[in-house]
Amino acid sequence: MRREPRLIAAYHGLLQVAQMTGDEELLTSSAEAALELDSADQWIYDDWIDAVMPQWGGSIEAMDAVAHRAVSHVSRNPLLARTPARSLCYQAKQYYCATCKNDFPQALALYRKAAEFGPVACFLTYAPGAAAGSGDYGDAVRYESQTYRFFGKTDDIVYRADYLSQIGHADWAREDLARMIAEYPKYTSALEHLAYLDEHAGNPQAAAKGYARIIEIDANHERAKLELSRLYMSSVPARDKAKALIEELLARNPKLARAWENRAMLVCNESDAQCRESLEKFLELANPDDAYEKKEIPRAKAKLAELGALGH
């Protein structure tokens, strides 16, 4: 800085140092000095907002104050118009994250408000899932389409296929997935979702072939082995193949709750002792926060109670 005080990139470093150390004086002086050089520098405003987030000792009000200042220079840098969305995105994240108690409608309302400032990244990334979590699959489809438009990630097509099937357009979902698989034949996420659609369309044989194809691509794909072993014990009977898959799953991951549930399906008509062991292991390992396992826990308990009654 002494050699070149107009080197604005150096102020980015100072802002990050101020953020990490909690030095408010350094933060403010560095931001002000940088903005004297360029009052419409988007990156300076972004760094400043990052540093005054609540988890760094700041507040929503502080974020909004920086954003308000940025917007006053939008005539020189139109991208600054999106800056007020930053605090809305931050607030939405408190209602929609892996470690919080999700409130999808509240998060969705905030993401929609953020989108009023333009195609902001947080809206494109999280609004589709928040809409789906709120049961608004129509908007989930629309939002995911925009996400694919701007980001172009293959996973966006898979997510959209899920949402399309929820609003009664499994045919459109299938077309999307087929195009994706034609372009990326080893794209297991698309193959998995197509297999799911095949089964629910009444074609378990096609579903079994899809899951088998996934296992050819990825020999350790747990979900494909779980689903294929289930089909081998129901709609596409092949008990020996089901047994082999379940043994592979448990050998690789003996703490996989659903593998123990599948083992129970395999043995409960043959051995009460093995059935009881499998169900007890499932209940020991099942995650009550997992939607599928939460639904299966009462069934496993009921079956165990039945076995107990039979033993008396």
Image: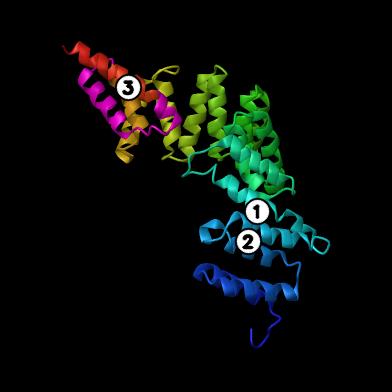
Closer to the N terminus: mark 3 or mark 2?
2
Residue 231 in the image, given as x and y percentages of width and height: 43, 22
Residue at image location 64% in from the left, 37% down from the top: 157
Q: Residue at x 57, y 29 (%)?
A: 194
Residue type at tag 3? Ala
Label located before the other in sequence (3 or 1): 1
Relative height, residue 42 to residue 113 (above, below) = below
Name the image quarter holding residue 160: top right
Question: Type of residue at label 2?
Answer: Ile
Can residue 76 be seen here? The reply is yes
Q: Which residue is mark 1?
A: 86
Name the amino acid, label 1.
Answer: Arg
Local packing at callout 1 (Cα closer than 10 Å; few below 14, some 14-19, many 20+) is many
Q: Which is more N-terminal, label 1 or label 2?
A: 2
Q: Are marks 2 and 1 in contact (CB under 8 Å)?
A: yes
User: Is 285 positioned to the left or the right of 35 in the image?
Assistant: left
The residue closer to the viewer here, 165 or 248, is 165
User: In the rendered structure, which segment of residues is drawn in magenta?
Assistant: 269-295
Extreme residue toward the left, this view: 312
Q: Nearer the viewer, residue 105 or 219?
A: 105
Q: Nearer the viewer, residue 243 or 148?
A: 148
- Res 300 label: 3
**x then y, percent, for residue 64:** 66, 56
Kindly report the distance in space between the C-alpha atoms of the residues bearing marks 3 and 1. Answer: 46 Å
Cα distance in 3D space between marks 3 and 2: 50 Å
- Among the 4 quarters of the image, the one containing residue 103: top right
SS label for mark 2: helix
Give the residue number, with chain letter if any, for mark 2.
49
Mark 2–mark 1 Cα distance, whole angstroms, equals 8 Å
Instruction: Determine crowd level at label 3: few under 14, some 14-19, many 20+ residues with C-alpha closer than 10 A.
Output: many
Please give the name of the residue rendered at 65% of the width and 24% of the height, measured from the top-left corner.
167
- Which of the two residues, 249 or 70, is positioned nearer the viewer here? 70
